[in-house]
Image: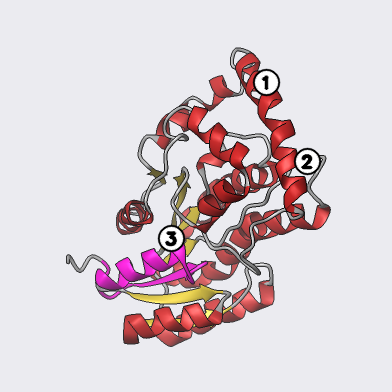
Amino acid sequence: MKQRFAGKVALVTGAARGIGAGVARGYVAGGGRVALVGLEPELLAALSDELGEAAAWWEADVRDSAAMKSAIDAAAAHFGRIDHVLANAGIASYGTVRQIDDEAFDRVVDINLNGVFRTLKHSTPHLEATNGYALTVASLASFATLAGLASYNASKAGAESLTLAYKQEVAHLGIDVGVCHPSWVDTDIVRNAEKDLPTFRAIRKKLPYPANGTTSVEACVDLILTGLEKRKTRVYVPKGVIVANWSKALTNSPVAWPVVRKLAARSVPSMEAEVEALGRFHHAHVPHVDD
């Protein structure tokens, strides 16, 4: 494999499983070294052992600013540098605005939005030292909303805006910044949501491309690795997600509203009933889900 990351070091949050773990493997295969940051220490340790001396891990919750600073500084000291940062840690919740409890809503926003803030904040001095690059994993949900996913939509839209503001703030420091927008990827979040909420699964089938399909983790990882290598401003997963970005004004316009309203009127009551029957606002994997 092309040694496109030779001599480089990446810090990946949400590295224990899914996209984060896949990117870590691909980065090392490309000649780089990785700092694995997240929860689930057994999974982090196993992945680090698999990758050998090219990897090291730190247990830290993106909700804890002091812990994130400690982990990021320790990773930079261990490897001597940080060239790439992937702010990947994220979760989703179930329930409409009138239904979801405050704690579940706050948790999604704290991880998906505030967690990105903490990751970027504490990575900045290390990225400045290497003229590095940061990539935030936002979502198709940043600009395409769906009833029942308000906390996720709000947090991912916020993550996009935060990252674009940060991009302006650090350009003079020699740091490049990008935003990744995956649609539905075959991770725990999507698989468990479809298992828990039949209405969610049914709605997805009625949505236009690319929201009606699922991208493999491998395909997502390949696009992210290319984004890291080429320091891309935007990474769309799949590439067709760019259409949703271009058309978001139309999607949220009065022209589209009658169609959206009709779909929501049919789906929201069923989805609320399914969440009520579940008795929880997230899937069964606890305490954390990595994108």
The span shown in magenta is 5-30
Say which residue appears at 44% left-offset and 49% top-offset. Answer: 185
43 relative to 229, above or below: below
Quarter occupied by the N terminus: bottom left
Which residue: 36% across, 49% down? 232
Identify the residue position indicated by label 1 in the image: 261
Marks 2 and 1 sit apart, C-alpha to C-alpha, by 16 Å
* Tag 1: amino acid: Arg
Is 43 a magenta residue?
no
| Front residue of this view, candidates 165 and 178 | 178
Mark 3 — residue? 19
- In the rendered structure, which disc, 1 or 3, sits on the residue that comes first in sequence? 3
Determine whether the residue tagged by mark 1 lies in a helix, strand or loop: helix
Counting from the top left corner in percent of width and height, residue 108 is at 68, 55
How many neighbours does mark 3 have within 10 angstroms: few (below 14), some (14-19), or many (20 or more)? many
Q: Is residue 39 above or below residue 106?
A: below
Q: Nearer the viewer, residue 13 or 43?
A: 43
Q: Position of residue 161 (x, y in %)?
A: 59, 44
Disc 3 to disc 2, C-alpha distance: 28 Å
**In the drawing, does residue 263 fall left or right of residue 95?**
left
Query: Is 61 on the left or on the right of 243, as rendered?
Result: right
Are dots 3 and 2 in contact, CB under 8 Å?
A: no
Residue 27 visible here: yes
Q: Secondary structure at mark 3?
A: helix
User: Which residue in the protein does label 2 denote?
Assistant: 97
